[in-house]
Image (cartoon, helix red, strand yellow):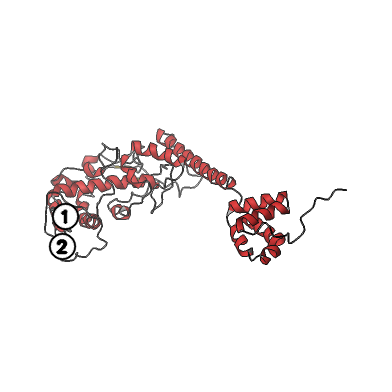
Amino acid sequence: MPSKLGVGYSRRAGTFGPPEGGFRAPTGRNAEWWYEDIVALVDAALPELAAAGEGHKLKAAAKKRVAAVLNARLRGGAAKSEKGVQQKLTDVLKIYHSVAFLKGLDQQGSGLHWDDAFGANVRSPADENVWDGIVSKHPYCEPFRNVGWDLFDVVAKMRPSKAKGDYVVRAATGEIGANRVGPSSGDPPSRDSTPDATTSAEDGDGGAAASQTVVDSSTQGTVPPATPAPVSRKRSSSSVPASTAKRARTAADSLTALGDRVGEFTEAFREANVAMTEALKPVDGSREALKVLVHKDKAWLDRHGKFHAAAHRMNDPAEAKLYLNMDHIGSSPRKTSLKFDLNISDTEPEDEPEDELLFD
């Protein structure tokens, strides 16, 4: 069943300036989302998202401000509601996760080769098989079979970069711990899943409290004073033992390895397919036929004013092949084929002696 999200917008104006006659007053019952609306939505939502911590659910007042910005620049359709603003943010984030999966940015290769212009770039039967498996599980990927997404870099501005280092403090939750991603973090959203745009705290004071960067030590427990600062593995020398044991192999690691193998197999299959196609191409004998024509029949054809016409016929692979086959039989069949094709009279005497087979 096709994805209803599509690419996130239905039309594109080509300019961010006002249309002829100025921006429109609201009309109709349904809002229209243009490409320019999505860009304006992201730009207006960015400063408001800071108050939402790591989530992407705007507070009521923030949604009202963003909707006002968009409704002041309407190109058509009904006014955009506060609920519609939040839903569109949710939708474009779902699309973003799906495209990130196809791009391989989640470190779980999809088995395809993303192209910014041609999307997943599905070309070969092997690509088709991989694509069918992806779409059956992740329908939001469907619009990008052979089309890129021109909003990826725009929506990416709403995705905070991951914290650096072995240990981090997360402002939204006050959590302190190793910066490790769970096995399911790279999967794009399925049809019924909800992205992190809808999983943050509800509107109200909770969002502001969550954005505090100072962690109350009384609520986090006492940190043992003798705990040494963690040493980065990149900087530690061989004489210093690692601070943590080697991480055990997980199911996610196995899936990642399997995805890599599928990608390697797909690439090898594609290269073999191209090589086989080249090997099975019919040999174009036009060049060889033209050489024989010049060497054996040019003088004869010039006397009849037919050389250029004959040379032109050799550009056709089928005609060139026939001419060469006749040449293998002998001079007479070769010339007979030219006489018939070029309307040279059969009653004219031979202009040069026939090739003879000599026997001892």
Label 2 secondary element: loop
Residue at horizontal 77%, vertical 54%? 355
Mark 1 crowd level (few <14, some 14–19, many ≥20, 10 Å Cα): many
Q: In the image, what residue type sits under mark 1?
A: Val
Task: Determine the CA span between mark 1 and mark 2.
Answer: 17 Å
| Snapshot quadrant of residue 67 | bottom left
The quadrant of the picture occupied by the N terminus is top left
Left or right position of 180 against 45: right
Task: Say which residue label 2 marks.
Answer: 23
> In this picture, is 108 found above or below 342?
above
Residue 271, x across and y down, in percent = 53, 45
Q: Residue 66 carries which label?
A: 1
Left or right position of 51 against 94: left
Q: Can residue 208 be seen from the camera position used here? A: no
Nearer-the-camera pick, 61 or 218 = 61
Residue at horizontal 31%, vertical 48%? 96
Q: Which mark is residue 302?
A: none
Q: Which of marks 1 and 2 is nearer the N terminus?
A: 2
Which is closer to the viewer, label 1 or label 2? 2
Residue 114, x across and y down, in percent = 41, 49
Nearer-the-camera pick, 211 or 55 = 55
> In this picture, is 352 found above or below 211?
below
Residue 119, x across and y down, in percent = 38, 49
Q: Can residue 140 be seen from the camera position used here? A: yes
Q: In the image, what residue type sits under mark 2?
A: Phe
The single residue placed furthest to the right in the displayed view is 360
Residue at horizontal 15%, vertical 62%? 23
